Image (cartoon, rainbow, N blue to C red):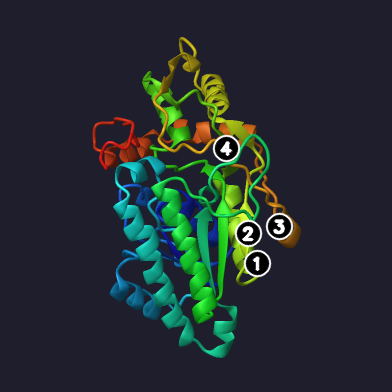
Amino acid sequence: MKLLITGGSGFIGSTLVLTALGRGHEVVNLDALTYAANPASLDAVRNDSAYQFEHADIRDSAALARVFAQHQPDAVMHLAAESHVDRSIDGPQVFVDTNVGGTAQLLQASTEYYRRLAADRAAAFRFHHISTDEVYGSLGATGRFSEESPYRPNSPYAASKASADMMVRAWHSTYALPTIISNCSNNYGPRQFPEKLIPVVILSALKGAPIPVYGRGANVRDWLHVEDHADALLAILERGRIGETYNVGGDAECSNLELVRLLCTELDRQHPRTGASSDQITFVTDRPGHDFRYAIDAAKLQGELGWSPRFTLAEGLAQTVGWYLDHADWCRAALTRLGGDDRLERLGLGAKG
């Protein structure tokens, strides 16, 4: 199967590209290479005959038409998006432009391509939209999000992804495009851009800098290893039912403060230094509209498709810390894309309007 993967040079996207190639698929990676993309994440497959790269933006309708005509994919897996909540607070418009407008452009290009396919290829075609559990809003101390949970997004990022989900639903209902949606919990693992919590903790600790924890660190997330997520995405694409939504979770709930302490302990075990990394924990002003808790009920995915996460949180964090310790050059290059001065800058205070 030839897959058109948008955002394939990003964190989840690069893992999906590598996983798909490893399972015998052909991959066309369409990526605009914005600041969070890292082509070095795919150096290992750069010369693979089954892999092709297209430097293009999902908002560019002419580029999309050319890519579809040239590569003739069997399926689309759509991950290209602005994804950092803090950045969406400081500058929401680019999230609307890319996540909503870009998704609409990609849906339209996919529909036009789909309508020209021969009957056998059209019957097998899929458009898989990869989304987030943040569209559901915030949970209290109990309960989990299911596919029936109402949408209640609380950040510009979450609202843009919820809007994109609704676009996908509309294209399926109105134009009969064969779509599937998946909503995942917080991803972690190798090659994550160093503005997200886990790489920020690791890299701040290594620098001897303060490790920022929002509020009192009581917010709870369900953590999903990115390799488990890639495995789930391919299962959904290959065996999921058209028009359905599947939630993907790691069954690994943890408060932010507990997670930071686990990371510090693991870092001190793998990279012993004078003093404890946890001494660098610093509580900072909370994020505006910070959702208290996310948790995913993945029973539908597990029951229908037989998927379950392979990594425990302890195993995944150990692997992730080890990867960052072993890939200092990758980290330096990624930090340069943040501004060239190796600063892990706090964003999301809502000061930029």
| Residue 162 in the image, given as x and y percentages of width and height | 48, 57
Contact? badges 1 and 3 (CB < 8 Å): no
Mark toward the start of the polypeptide (2 vs 4): 2
User: Mark 1 or mark 4, which is nearer to you?
Assistant: 4
- Amino acid type at image mark 2: Tyr
Q: Secondary structure at mark 2?
A: strand
The alpha-carbon separation of the residues under discs 3 and 2 comes to: 7 Å
The alpha-carbon separation of the residues under discs 1 and 4 comes to: 28 Å
Residue located 46% across and 30% down the image: 325
Q: Which residue is mark 4?
A: 293
- Amino acid type at image mark 1: Gly
Q: Which residue is mark 3?
A: 300
Whether residue 266 is visible here, answered yes or no, is yes
User: Which residue is at the far right?
Assistant: 303
| Residue 165 in the image, given as x and y percentages of width and height | 50, 62
Contact? badges 2 and 4 (CB < 8 Å): no
Residue located 51% across and 48% down the image: 134
Mark toward the start of the polypeptide (1 vs 4): 1
Q: Is residue 184 above or below residue 116?
A: above
Contact? badges 3 and 4 (CB < 8 Å): no
Sort mark 3 into few (<14), some (14-19) or many (20+) by Cα contacts within 10 Å.
some
